[in-house]
Image (tube, rainbow, N blue to C red):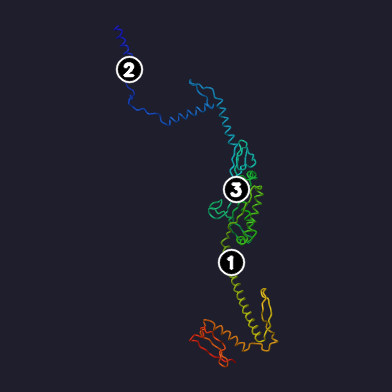
Amino acid sequence: MDESGNGGAESSATARPQMPIGGMVRDPREIKTNPSLTKFLRERISAGIIGSLVAIGVLRPRNPSGELGPRSWKGLGAFLGSIFAIVFVWTSVHIVQPGNVGVPVTFGHAGKPLRAGFHITLPFTTAYSMNTRTQNYTMTSNPGEGQKGNTDDSVAVLGRDGGSAAVNATVLYRVDPAFATAVFQKLGTNYASAIVRPSARFCIRTVFTQYGVVADATTLWGTLESGVGTCLANAFKAQAQGGLILQDFQLREVTLAPSLAQAVTNKVAAQQVEQQQQFELATAQQQADIQRIQALANADSQEIIQCGGSAASIKRNGLESETVIPNPLNRCDNAGLTNAYLEFTYIQALGKVAASNNATTLVLPFDKNLTPLLSVPSGSSGSSSAGASTAGTTSP
């Protein structure tokens, strides 16, 4: 028994595997690292994509043995049906924003315009939006304005008199919603460059040649706007089949050529000088008329004093007044200026001088008895002034 037992122990010790000598020795205390997050996410995403493709029937599953299993035809049908439904809804439902119309185009055929709102059309229909609000096209030389930005886009024109000018203008227009399909078929969405700009420039040049350029820039502003507006409306009707409606044409500025502007300035200055001369001539004629009337009044006054007169009623400026008409000269024996009349006039003039506050020296007439013929007011400076001198004259 002991021998057998000892033999078994020896055999078991002999059968125990021995550790290999050499090779890489790993420290049992070494810290093991986990897989990277990027690798983990890539593996999970790949597994999810593959699982989804298998579920919808695009890929066939694999059995544990590695062989391909049957395809999920039910899942594939549901997937294709969902794709078709999404495409159908996407191409059939259209929402048109306010201030716009949609032109539906299905396989090259344009249908009736779609008003603003929600619309369902045939599948695979594309709705092209067209703006129906009032739009403007500005042609100007001012930087930063108009469709050309900083480029000089003014219209060069020639007048009937050969003068040149540069015109800044604005065209206000809109698309008629009822004719949006016709505009889209004939012009597309680039109707501003195709119709509005060339028609406006043509009409501006055409109308300006009918008048002188100086009159165009001054007195014919309204006539030019009306003429260009009529020309543009006719052009829109002929070329856009009534789809473009002209709202207004605004003539903003007309700049004459420098040489022409200087000539106009000189002409205006000459006209101002001529008007000033005419005013001075009219003033001189009016003063001459006043003096003539005064002379006639003096002559009538003399005749009335010498020859007498008769009362009469006359109308002046629609008003009736009383006056004295002198007697004819054939009824007057003392016609002409007499000494008595001259002395009377002289006394009246001295009375005005005596009543003036500026008189310091008075010449008072006396009669033959040295009696003053003029009573000087006590408040006048002429009678109270110490330096006043008095001279006597005798009447003839």
Q: Residue at x 59, y 35 (%)?
A: 89
The residue under label 2 is which amino acid type?
Answer: Gln
Q: Residue furthest front?
A: 378
The residue under label 3 is which amino acid type?
Answer: Arg
User: Closer to the N terminus: mark 3 or mark 1?
Assistant: 3
Whether label 3 touches label 1, CB < 8 Å = no
Name the residue carrying label 3. Answer: 133
Q: Residue at x 59, y 53 (%)?
A: 170
Instruction: Tell which tag, 3 or 1, sits nearer the viewer.
Output: 3
Q: Position of residue 91 (x, y in %)?
A: 59, 36
CA gap between label 2 and label 3 equals 95 Å
Quadrant the C terminus occupies = bottom right
Q: Secondary structure at mark 2?
A: loop
Q: Residue at x 55, y 88 (%)?
A: 364
Instruction: Tell which tag, 2 or 1, sits nearer the viewer.
Output: 1
CA gap between label 3 and label 1 equals 45 Å
Disc 2 packing (10 Å; few <14; some 14–19; many ≥20) = few
